[in-house]
Image (cartoon, rainbow, N blue to C red):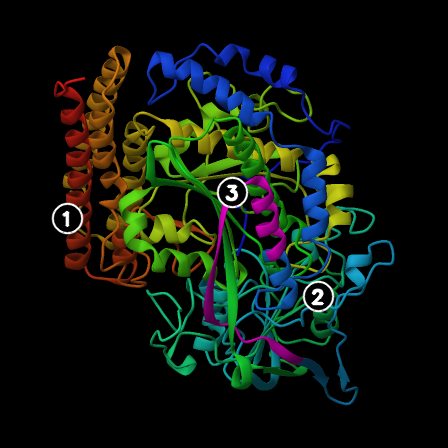
């Protein structure tokens, strides 16, 4: 998982040698914002909050971030291994030293590890491929034992057949093969990484009768075609490869929808959607060895990659044998461990702001996702120091590091399933840190209701290269020049640990990170040395991400009225109706079907605007705590209204009717997934029912906003 969902970063420029910002610099950076109002705060509390946020922003240190990164990425730490348990112990020790209350949540999940893998090119020159990524003498971490080159949740067994090249392995690629008269039944399939989640590639290959799947990263995408390769540059060496899960789901596949605790009922692996065929990642070097012997149909023009040969589809005459064994029969179930650090709130201890990152990786994982873990630790350190000085947040802030994200968001999903009742009642926001620093170009996204808060916070965070604030640099790099426009932000479709919070329960989320050129994703080369040289020299952006996290968590935790922006939410939703209209037109279905949905969205926008005016007026005069509490309870209902208990028809675990990952892609976000999946696969009547349901949910969301406004408009005794 851990794919970067924000707008793509631009080229990386040389970073400055700064290692930390002095309080004076931080204060000067935010001077222009220090007298401005803050959504959800009265004028008096806004002044105090600006001061507190500047203290929080001054807390994270690049020097300490570097130390954390070195300790946590010193060895590969795949979920379910002793090395991963060592990262658990390190994080818990750090949080205890900060003075936080700590907890470890342990789950027994289906996590079979590969025990052997072999790929043999058959024929007169039969030879086994060298699969391991070669070590680099100047980077000791690359010389350590590696996790075998097998995709997580791969099927075990033997698959042998002629090789067929299927481009990216997309549904449309198989349609092209059909038009060429090429079948993959009984064949070994070779696909490129990219354009779709690897689990979808596996599903489509297996569905069409392939006996094994090999996946490689083409140099055209993140190798020498894009820049110098590691160790001379940041891109993927020719013998580098990308591991990763091929499970199309979230959480333990044997306990769908409930936590994997002792005594929980469990499905049999063969009764799940887990892949049945071997799925193995290989390097571009090995892909070239195999492809150079493939003949048959010439590839379409847009299938040609960056290797020094002409690609052909096949089948054959290259014949390949793929063999994978796992420990499924002996110890397929393994323990995973989430860590939690609590900073208890003074006023609303049962309302929670989460900031979380996953700890597990496929290699040393300096970028994915020790950078996120370090960001969480730095935010925790800053706010824990403030608490020691008596400046505690009003709501409880939870600093989480999740296990087994790389196997299908397992740790965070199990936690959400276990604590769903408490989360639905009291979780205010989840802030996600996934690959938070591997470059200098900022990107952000999440629920439209929290985007304005994120934009405002980064206006007060110094850009590490001295180019004003992070917000100013963000505008510049995205070419956002008009004052009436904002930088583009990403949507929470799926693919990271926010999924349990947003896609499953409807809890608002935000995420951000700093990106740049990188070709070490899910490889043995994602090391501390790579990060020091190319990703984040000086670890300035690790600290900057921690600064944003500390200020964001504090902003939401201390708000008198939760700072959700449902005007922006409604305006964003209105844009998504056009996708439905296009789908209806293509199907030649009723063109006016979306009119009730548009009307319902407009109702939410009007309700949100009226609420915002009432909120600001009441806060100007001063608000009674009990009144604010009741209003906030109503606001928590808004996005929960879009989480349908029965979920999507295609994937019941995904309940949000606002966003989901595309069921046929995995990396793409599908907006209004209930409706758009019905257009794709259902009937006109089913689609109309989905539109009607969605419109009713916008009505319920508007009613919750109206309820909050009515609470604020009712006089309360002081």
User: Residue 692 has which mark?
Assistant: 1
Distance, label 1 to label 3, CA atoms, is 47 Å
Q: Residue furthest bottom?
A: 124
* Residue 361 located left or right of residue 512: right
Q: Which residue is mark 2?
A: 283
Residue drawn at (54%, 60%), measured in percent from left and top?
Answer: 406
Residue 26, placed above or below residue 497: above
| Span of residues in magenta | 89-116
Q: Secondary structure at mark 3?
A: loop
Vertical arrangement, residue 5 with respect to residue 142, above or below: above
Closer to the chain start, of discs 1 and 3, is 3
Where residue 436 appears, as percent x and y from the top left, is: 58, 42
Q: Which residue position is annotated with label 3?
A: 100
How far across and how far down the image is residue 97, in percent?
60, 43
Which of labels 3 and 2 is toward the front? 3
Q: Residue at x 48, y 80 (%)?
A: 276
Quadrant assignment for the C terminus: top left
Q: Nearer the viewer, residue 58 or 605?
A: 58
Residue 168 drawn above or below residue 715: below
First in sequence: mark 1 vs mark 2: 2
Q: Is residue 499 left or right of residue 476?
A: left
| Residue 196 counted in the magenta span | no
Few, some or many residues within 10 Å of mark 1 (<14, 14–19, 20+): some
Is any atom of residue 18 visible in this view? Answer: yes
Residue 357 in the image: state x and y as whole percent. Answer: 52, 48
Mark 3 and mark 2 lie on one chain; the one further toward the N terminus is 3
């Amino acid at each position: 998982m851990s794919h970067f969902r924000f707008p793509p970063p631009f080229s990386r420029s040389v970073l400055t040698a700064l290692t930390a910002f002095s309080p004076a610099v931080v204060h000067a950076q935010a001077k222009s914002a220090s007298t401005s109002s803050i959504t959800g705060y009265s004028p008096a509390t806004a002044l105090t909050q600006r001061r507190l946020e500047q203290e929080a922003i001054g807390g994270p240190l690049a020097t300490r971030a570097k130390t954390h990164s070195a300790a946590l990425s010193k060895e590969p730490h795949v979920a379910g291994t002793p090395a991963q348990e060592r990262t658990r112990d390190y994080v818990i020790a750090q949080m205890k030293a900060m003075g936080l209350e700590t907890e470890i949540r342990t789950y027994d999940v289906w996590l079979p590890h590969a025990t052997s893998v072999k790929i043999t090119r058959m024929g007169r020159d039969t030879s086994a491929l060298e699969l391991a990524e070669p070590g680099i003498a100047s980077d000791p971490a690359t010389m350590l034992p590696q996790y075998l080159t097998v995709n997580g949740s791969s099927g075990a067994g033997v698959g042998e057949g002629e090789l067929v090249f299927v481009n990216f392995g997309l549904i449309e690629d198989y349609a092209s093969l059909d038009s060429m008269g090429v079948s993959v039944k009984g064949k070994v399939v070779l696909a490129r990484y990219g354009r779709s989640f690897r689990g979808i590639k596996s599903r489509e290959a297996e569905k069409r009768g392939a006996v094994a799947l090999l996946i490689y990263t083409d140099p055209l995408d993140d190798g020498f075609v894009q820049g110098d390769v590691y160790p001379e540059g940041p891109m993927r060496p020719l013998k580098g490869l990308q591991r990763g899960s091929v499970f199309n789901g979230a959480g333990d596949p044997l306990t769908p929808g409930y936590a994997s605790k002792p005594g929980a009922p469990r499905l049999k692996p063969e009764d799940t959607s887990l892949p049945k065929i071997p799925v193995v990642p290989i390097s571009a070097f090995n892909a070239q060895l195999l492809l150079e012997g493939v003949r048959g149909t010439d590839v379409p023009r847009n299938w040609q990659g960056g290797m020094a040969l002409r690609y052909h589809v096949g089948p054959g005459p290259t014949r390949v044998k793929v063999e994978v064994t796992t420990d499924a029969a002996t110890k397929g179930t393994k323990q995973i461990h989430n860590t939690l650090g609590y900073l208890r709130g003074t006023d609303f201890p049962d309302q929670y702001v989460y900031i979380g990152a996953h700890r597990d990786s496929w290699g040393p994982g300096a970028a994915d996702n020790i950078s996120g873990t370090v960001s969480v630790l730095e935010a925790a350190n800053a706010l824990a120091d403030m608490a020691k000085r008596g400046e505690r947040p009003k709501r409880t802030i939870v600093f989480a590091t999740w296990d087994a994200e790389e196997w299908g968001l397992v740790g965070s999903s199990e936690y959400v399933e276990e604590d769903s009742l408490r989360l639905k009642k009291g979780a205010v926001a989840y802030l996600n840190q996934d690959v938070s620093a591997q470059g200098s170009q900022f990107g952000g996204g999440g629920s439209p209701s929290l985007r304005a808060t994120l934009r405002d916070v980064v206006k007060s965070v110094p850009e590490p290269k001295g180019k004003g604030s992070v917000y100013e640099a963000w505008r510049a790099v995205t070419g956002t020049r008009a004052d009436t426009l904002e930088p583009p932000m990403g949507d929470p479709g799926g693919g990271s640990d926010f999924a349990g919070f947003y896609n499953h329960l409807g809890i608002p989320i935000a995420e951000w990170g700093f990106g740049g050129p990188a070709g070490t994703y899910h490889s043995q080369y994602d090391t501390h040395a790579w990060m020091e040289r190319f990703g984040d020299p000086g670890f300035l952006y690790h600290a900057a991400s921690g600064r944003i996290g500390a200020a964001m968590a504090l902003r939401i935790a201390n708000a008198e009225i939760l700072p959700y922006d449902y005007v922006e939410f409604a305006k964003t939703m209105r844009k998504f109706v056009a996708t439905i209209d296009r789908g209806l037109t293509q199907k030649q279905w009723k063109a006016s079907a979306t009119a009730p949905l548009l009307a319902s969205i407009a109702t939410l926008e009007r309700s949100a605007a009226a609420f915002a005016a009432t909120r600001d007026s009441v806060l100007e005069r001063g608000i009674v705590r009990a009144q604010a509490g009741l209003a906030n309870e109503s606001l928590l209902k808004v996005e929960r209204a879009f989480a349908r208990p029965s979920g999507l028809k295609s994937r019941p675990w995904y309940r949000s009717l606002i966003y989901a990952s595309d069921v046929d892609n995995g990396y793409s976000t599908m907006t209004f997934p209930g409706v758009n999946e019905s257009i794709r696969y259902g009937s006109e009547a089913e689609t109309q029912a989905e539109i009607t349901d969605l419109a009713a949910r916008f009505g319920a969301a508007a009613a919750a906003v109206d309820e909050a406004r009515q609470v604020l408009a009712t006089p309360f005794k002081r």
